[in-house]
């Protein structure tokens, strides 16, 4: 596989992983892992809605391995999460059809059910000969503003061309906070 073909494959696989197309569309994880050692009141919440995303391939011959595809992420969330995000994605395809992986980080800023702040989402996706696994989690302690203490997992789906998110999260409040 030549370099150009590999980059095209990486971009396509990255899109499948990022958007939840094909076998990724029904990946869902329900477990949340709040810190049980701290004395906090934890309330489980659910948010859902739609989003638009723009991916732009980033080429820089002086950074890293040229077989690793890199893209910028620019998203607009609607629904329970009214926010925008910016981030970066790295993706790699292999010589084995249907096997690839990607990682991404994106900082989400806006309002989650009326609460203002920001947090970071970490994506990790793999595809092993067509069998997919996708995890999108909130980076611990990345919450700011009214979203300090946020933890959770997001599922990304595409239905009839529409991008959807489902976000299960906790928002820990210490006994001293109001």
Image (spheres, rainbow, N blue to C red):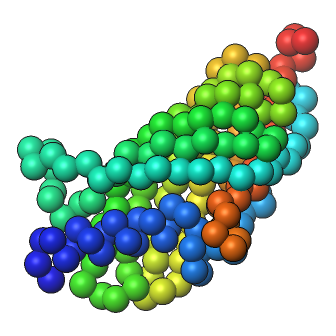
Quarter occupied by the N terminus? bottom left
From where the camera sits, is residue 143 visible?
Answer: no
Q: Is residue 37 left or right of residue 102?
A: right
Question: Which residue is rendered at x = 38% and y = 81% of the image?
Answer: 99
Image quadrant in which you'd find residue 19: bottom right
For the C terminus, the image quarter is top right
Quick one: 33 or 69, which is closer to the camera?
69
Q: Point out residue 113 in the picture as x, y percentages from the top left corner.
A: 84, 33
Instruction: Determine whether 11 is above or below 166 in the image.
Output: below
Is residue 35 positioned above or below 147 on the image? below
* Percent of width and height locating residue 69: 27, 59
- Relative placement, left or right, of 6 versus 135 is left
Total marks shown come to 0
Query: Which of the two residues, 144 or 166, is positioned nearer the viewer here?
Result: 166
**Closer to us: 84 or 124:** 84
State the image coordinates of residue 114 (x, y, percent, origin top left): 83, 27
Residue 142 left/right relative to 17: right
Residue displayed at 48% across by 42% down: 74
Q: Name above or below for residue 25 compared with residue 143.
A: below
Is 92 drawn above or below residue 36 in the view shown?
Answer: below
Give 160 or 152, whichever is nearer the viewer. Answer: 160
Residue name at image x 34 percent, y 88 percent: 97
The residue sitting at 90% across, 17% down in the picture is 175
């Amino acid at each position: 596989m030549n370099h150009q073909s590999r980059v095209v494959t990486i971009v396509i696989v990255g899109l499948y992983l990022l958007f939840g197309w094909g076998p990724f569309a029904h990946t869902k994880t329900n477990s949340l892992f709040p810190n049980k050692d701290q004395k906090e009141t934890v309330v489980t919440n659910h948010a859902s809605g739609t989003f638009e995303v723009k991916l732009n391939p980033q080429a820089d011959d002086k950074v890293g391995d040229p077989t690793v595809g890199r893209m910028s992420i620019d998203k607009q969330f609607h629904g329970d999460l009214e926010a925008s995000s910016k981030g970066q994605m790295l993706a790699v395809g292999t010589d084995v059809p249907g096997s690839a992986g990607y990682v991404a980080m994106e900082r989400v800023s806006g309002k989650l059910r009326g609460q203002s702040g920001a947090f970071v989402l970490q994506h990790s996706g793999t595809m092993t000969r067509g069998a997919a696994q996708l995890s999108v989690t909130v980076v611990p302690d990345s919450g700011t503003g009214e979203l300090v203490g946020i933890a959770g997992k997001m599922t990304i789906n595409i239905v009839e061309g529409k991008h959807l998110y489902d976000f299960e999260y906790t928002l820990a409040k210490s006994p001293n906070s109001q």
